Amino acid sequence: MDVLDRIREQVENNAVVLYMKGTPQFPMCGFSSRAAEALKSCGVPFAYVNVLQDQEIFENLPRFADWPTFPQLYINGELVGGCDITLELQASGELERMVKEAVEKAEQGAPAANDDQG
Amino acid sequence: MMNRQQTLQQALRAALDPMHLEVLDESHMHNVPEGAQSHFKVTVVSERFAGQPLIARHRQVNAALRDEFEAGLHALAIHAMTPAEWFKRGGKAPASPPCLGGSKAQP
């Protein structure tokens, strides 16, 4: 699969995705670390991609949404921003609301296994 | 020849007509050679940001510095505010984080 299609699939199939250097447990960059901590503070699970472990994504993510730096936070398939924006949204309480809404929406949208009522 | 700090200042001044502009070379805080001019922090206060969401403000800053990103600018902390927001914060931008080692790491 083309790398841009691969990224598109990741951001569309996960309500919240953080592209970062390292992992939330072992971040390799101060900016990535802060963004991951901000997301953790929202108390809902989120997906992440360690760009240091994927050369293709590392090289191509900047042109996916025309954003030159890491980390990059996507909610509902849309780029929200990098570290500074994530922290500002956290400080204003917006981040938690956005993340929770996205996760709820994803849960409602997911086809329930035994639900044939439409 | 201008150093990168001056180049960034010039580009941002031209693009955003800032009331206040600070460009700090924070490369020394990171795992890069001395004089790398790779990590910067920009505080830009401009009336042009009024009514714009953060991502639109940051996109304008990034766009103004596109050539520099292509020429080796690696990290940019951005604090983009309107004059009213800037005064409300008491004229200060948040501090940047420490490195943690990933600057030199390539996948």
Image (spheres, grey):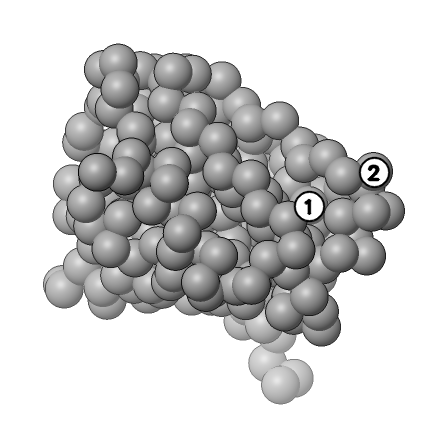
In front of the other: label 1 or label 2? 2
Residue B75's x, y, as percent?
37, 37
Question: The C terminus of chain A is located in which quarter?
Answer: bottom right
Q: Residue furthest front?
A: B1
Q: Mark 1 vs mark 2: same chain?
A: no
Between A30 and A77, which is closer to the camera in this rendering? A30
Q: Could you say whether the residue bearing mark 2 is in a helix, strand or loop? A: loop
Residue A14's x, y, as percent?
47, 57
Does residue A10 show up? no
Residue type indicated by callout 2? Gly
Q: Could you say whether the residue bearing mark 1 is in a helix, strand or loop? A: helix
Residue to which mark 1 is pinned: A88
Residue B44's x, y, as percent?
59, 50
On residue B90, which mark appears? 2
Picture layout, residue B14 above or below residue B33: below
Picture layout, residue A6 above or below residue B104: below
Chain of the residue that carries numbered disc 1 in the rendered image: A
Question: The N terminus of chain A is located in which quarter?
Answer: bottom left
Between A65 and A42, which is closer to the camera in this rendering? A65
Q: Give the residue displayed 39% in from the left and 56% down from the top.
A: B11
